[in-house]
Image (cartoon, helix red, strand yellow):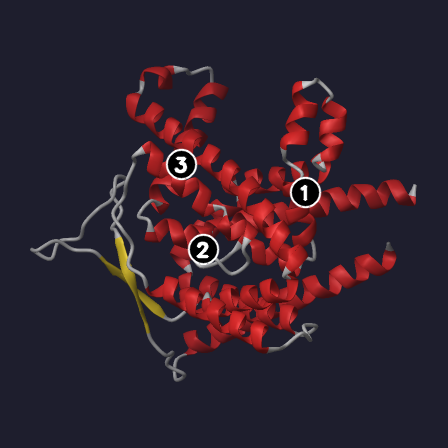
Amino acid sequence: MYNAARTLQDKVFLIIKGLAMGAANKVPGVSGGIVAFVAGFYEEFIYALQKINGKAFKLLFNGRFKSFFQYIHGRFLGLLILGMLISYFSVSKLLDYFIEKHELYVWAAFFGMIIGSIYYIGKDFKSWNYKTVCSLILGTVVGISISLLSPAKENDNLIFIFFCGIISVSGMTLPGLSGSFILILLGNYVLLLVDSVNALYDTFAEMFRGDFSFTSNEPRLKMLSILGVFTAGSAVGLVTLSHLLNFVLKHYKNIATATIMGFIAGSLGVVWPWKRTMYKTDDTGAFLLDSSGERIIENYQRFFPDLSIRETWVALIFVMIGVLIVLALDWYGKRTRKVK
């Protein structure tokens, strides 16, 4: 009875971890890979993805579905992906609401979580030498450089969309490198993570009501095709990057860990809570709009907080809450390993 309850609890927590990864991946500046790293299943996640290879497809095409499922760690990946899918239609929408209504506090909490992540990864890392220090510095410089880039214009070319899919999954495989922020830099964040996802949600809602009028709705069909190509690119990128990372973690683990710490430290500039959004304008000073009618982000103007106002102190409390969330995850991970 205990084992059965334990198995059910593990399944539920895997789905919750998937929810957290999905929500983190959608927030610009936050990496779903950080969730996997801090929650203690990053290497298992990369290893499972690495099992999606030629042997796996051979098992699948030969009709050995059970062997295929076991070989790719299907239960582990399936529950994680289920959590991510649920997140994209629920938790991420909740996050969108809070970012719109309480943006400062949301960014403050994520800032605290990233600080906690740096502490979590660094506290047990003892392999400091010339190579790992250089890797840390390089990762930090790259992370900061990415945060200072200006976004490009929206591009719905399907080849470019496929490329965006490959790039966007970097947030799941590389902790500290935000896939959603990279999509902003590529100009396609709204198109791929808002408009196309909403189009799919609306399509499912209509089909549930027995309404199939979307089949003659050209803009909707175009959005669905864009989402399909983006998903295909993401799948290819996820598997490809996982093979590369599995090799790197196996042969250069200390260097990889130091670089990841640098990425995460560099990403602090992206999620710095105290910033103003700068929007692109034309020659007349009018705001430029994307395909959904939203203003196009040019970059962020960061500033130091005013300690004389109450809002700043509330935000600092949220920073501490973010740090405590990571420490709580660390505590839970240690407790779970002891029980097992």
Label 2: element kind: helix
The amino acid marked with disc number 3 is Phe
The residue carrying mark 2 is 98
Image quadrant occupied by the N terminus? top right
Q: What is the C-alpha distance between the residues marked 1 and 2?
A: 33 Å
Mark 2 or 3: in front is 3
The amino acid marked with disc number 2 is Phe
Identified at 27% across, 43% down, the residue is: 154
Badge 2: few (under 14), some or many (20 or more) residues near its Cα, within 10 Å?
A: some
The residue carrying mark 1 is 48
- What is the number of the mark on residue 106? none
Q: What is the C-alpha distance between the residues marked 2 and 3?
A: 30 Å
Closer to us: 260 or 274: 260
The amino acid marked with disc number 1 is Ala
Residue 42, image x, y percentages:
65, 54
User: For residue 75, what is the image quadrant?
Assistant: top right
Closer to us: 33 or 111: 33
Identified at 31% across, 20% down, the residue is: 217
The residue carrying mark 3 is 162
User: For residue 56, what is the image quadrant?
Assistant: top right
Identified at 75% across, 60% down, the residue is: 333
Identified at 38% across, 71% down, the residue is: 274
Image quadrant occupied by the C terminus? bottom right
Label 3: element kind: helix
Q: Earlier in the sequence, mark 2 or mark 3?
A: 2
Badge 1: few (under 14), some or many (20 or more) residues near its Cα, within 10 Å?
A: many
